[in-house]
Amino acid sequence: MVKITDVARRAGVSPSTVSYALSGKRPISDATRRRVQAAVHELGYRADAGRVRAGRGSKVLALAVPMRPGIHVPVMTRLAVSVVTAARAHDHDVLLLTQGDGEEGIGRVAETGLADAVIVTDVQLHDPRLPLLRSRSLPSVLIGVPAEPEGLTCVDLDFRAAGELCVDHLARLGHRVVALVGSPPEVYVRRTAFARRLVEGFTSAADRHRLTSAVYPCGTGREDARALAERLLRELPALTAVVVHNEPLLDPLTDAFERLGVRIPGDLSLTAVCPAPVAATARLPLTSVAVPSGELGTRAVRLLMRKLSGAPVPGATLLPPRLTERASTAPRGV
């Protein structure tokens, strides 16, 4: 079946321009309109081919999962599986949108009726997709909370509270110098909401307890872990506790510290922010605040189903963090 994107490619314009040229919703130059009409004729495109009949719905949910630097694929996979499972329980299929910025994919879905609604992930504080979501009739739920969530439906772990909870736990154990090993640098450059908010919570709690603290973004490889372990011990010689918000780095960082003669938890306590099964099955079981990827996906689908039915939904839902103590933390000096 010829798609609107095929027409756009042939005419040398964007899919939205094709839509406007065919629908007349916005003014398009005569030259552009002629190019679009010529492409439609050459390809045999039918403007209603991708649309569902009025009132019936597509029975499809779109899931925007941008594949861009710093994305941890296993976390997104767990999230996608939970969305698919929950959607099937409501007799819906799921369409994945994986383009880097996501704007074109969401716009295409809104214009063609490919999906009834969309779930948006990897939300930034000032996400460029928000004007599109606010201007369309396509129902949406964000897994993540932008800086200005007014008029949007959002669900996420309360990452600020998660950062505070980790530091509160370490402060109770007597630690006075703490570090946060964070996500890859590009995640902070994009001002990704969950990463920024965890840093805010970590720093706020450290200040409240009058601890010495520092934040270190880090890559995800073993060499990154080795270099960072050496840097931490060099720059913070009194360091006795680390919070890790970088799932692929958990085992490599533990190995790197042990190779440097640092005993965990005897010399250094480690706390992670990651899915509970990852923390529980790490080489050294890790004290952790659980990231409930599955629950977030399920809740997002339920919120969308309520929106599609016309039922009211809350603007923002923040799941409270829960900390589970395991073998990686101990009182300072023990």
Image (cartoon, grey):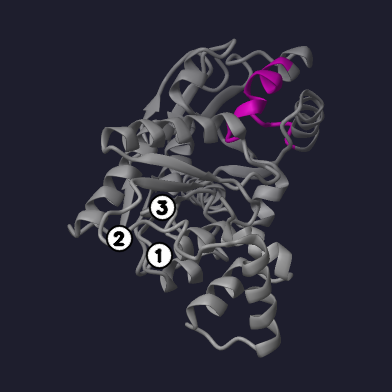
Image coordinates for residue 68, horizontal then vertical, percent = 67, 46
Residue 316: quadrant of the picture? bottom left
Task: Give how far apart the Cα atoms at labels 3 and 2 are.
Answer: 22 Å
Image coordinates for residue 294, horizontal then vertical, percent = 39, 31
- For this orientation, the residue located farthest to the left is 311
The amino acid type, in three-letter code, at marker 3 is Ala
Image point 45% across, 48% down: which residue? 62
Above/below status of 303 relative to 258: below
Task: Give how far apart the Cα atoms at labels 3 and 1 are.
Answer: 23 Å
**Would residue 48 be visible to someone looking at this image?**
yes
Closer to us: 28 or 104: 28
N-term-proximal mark, 2 vs 1? 1
Residue tagged 1: 149
Residue 250: quadrant of the picture? top right
Quick check: marks 2 and 1 in contact, CB under 8 Å?
A: yes
Task: Give how far apart the Cα atoms at labels 2 and 1 are.
Answer: 8 Å
Q: Does the magenta stretch include residue 110?
A: no
N-term-proximal mark, 3 vs 2? 3
Closer to us: 80 or 224: 80
Which mark lies nearer to you, 3 or 2? 3
Image coordinates for residue 228, horizontal then vertical, percent = 77, 32
Above/below status of 196 relative to 268: below
Q: What is the magenta range? A: 236-255
Above/below status of 191 relative to 213: below
Residue tagged 2: 315
The amino acid type, in three-letter code, at marker 1 is Pro
Residue tagged 3: 115
Above/below status of 100 relative to 301: below
